[in-house]
Structure formats: C-alpha cells, structure tokens
C-alpha cells in the first residue's frame, strides 16, 4: 500500500512543528499557508526607516514551556531568558 503525504493546513508554529515531527518519522507532508509568509503569529517586522526590528507577536515564553525549549535546543535556535520575578 502506498502511503499518501499528510496535508497540514497553516504554516504557523503548530503546522511547522507537525511537519517537522512527521519528517523525523519518515512521513512526507505538504504544508499549505494562505499568507505570503510562514510563521503565523510569530512575525518580526523589518523594513526601511524602522531601524530596530519590531516583534509583532509571540514575543516571550516562560521556563515552564519545556517542550518549546527542547525544540529550540534541538533546532539550534537561540533565545533569551525572561525575567519572571520582581517588581516593575
């Protein structure tokens, strides 16, 4: 029996991680995205005259997000520790 590729709707974090995990299991996946970019709500706005990049979504996560931290380490993606105590 020939295995059909999985179809994943949406190239946000969930869709991209799903495609990545399927690929590790040897399952082909097709990711479909309506927008002209990947990332979903994770988006860094860059462009002429803006100077410093501006994060438009998904700007922080805490140390309790162990699955996300493990994925970032596996992919070699850097991140900054977040302050979660003290007063502002």
Image: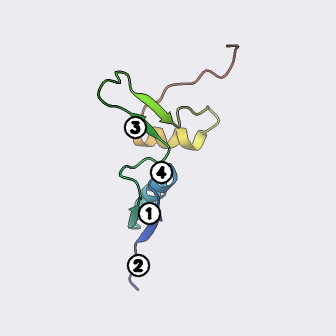
Precedes in sequence: disc 2 or disc 1? 2
**How much space separates mark 3 and mark 4, taking CA atoms?**
19 Å
Residue named by callout 2: 3
Secondary structure found at label 1: loop
Q: Residue at x 44, y 54 (%)?
A: 11
For label 4, the crowd category at 10 Å Cα-Cα, with few meaning under 14, some 14 to 19 and many 20 or more, is some
73 and 84: which one is in front? 84
User: Residue sitting at 47 percent across and 63 percent down?
Assistant: 9
Q: Tell me where residue 50 sits by quadrant.
A: top left
Count of numbered badges drawn on the protein: 4
Of callouts 3 and 4, the N-terminal one? 4
Labels 4 and 1: the sequence-earlier one: 4
Task: State whether residue 18 is above or below residue 58.
Answer: below
Residue 25: mark in rendering: 1
Q: Nearer the viewer, mark 2 or mark 1?
A: 2
Residue 14: assigned label: none
Q: Which residue is the site of mark 3? A: 76
Q: The C terminus lies in which quarter of the figure? A: top right
Q: Give the distance between the C-alpha atoms of the residues marked 1 and 3, in whole angstroms.
A: 20 Å
The N terminus sits in image quarter? bottom left
Read off the residue under disc 4.
Answer: 12
Mark 3 lies on a secondary structure that is: loop
Q: How is the image coloured?
A: rainbow
Q: Earlier in the sequence, mark 4 or mark 2?
A: 2
Structural distance between the alpha carbons of marks 4 and 1: 20 Å
The kind of secondary structure element at disc 2 is: loop
Q: CB of mark 1 within 8 Å of CB of mark 3?
A: no
Circle 2/circle 3 CB separation < 8 Å? no
Residue sitting farthest toward the front: 49
Residue drawn where x is 38% and y is 67% of the image: 28
Q: What is the CA distance from the residue labelled 2 to the residue labelled 3? A: 31 Å
């Amino acid at each position: 029996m020939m295995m059909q590729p999985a179809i994943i709707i949406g190239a946000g974090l969930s869709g991209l991680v799903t495609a990545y995990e399927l690929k590790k299991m040897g399952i082909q996946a097709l990711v479909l995205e309506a927008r002209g970019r990947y990332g979903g709500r994770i988006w860094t706005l860059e462009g002429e005259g803006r100077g410093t990049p501006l994060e438009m979504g998904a700007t922080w996560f805490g140390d309790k997000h162990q699955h996300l931290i493990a994925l970032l380490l596996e992919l070699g993606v850097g991140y900054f520790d977040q302050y979660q105590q003290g007063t502002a």
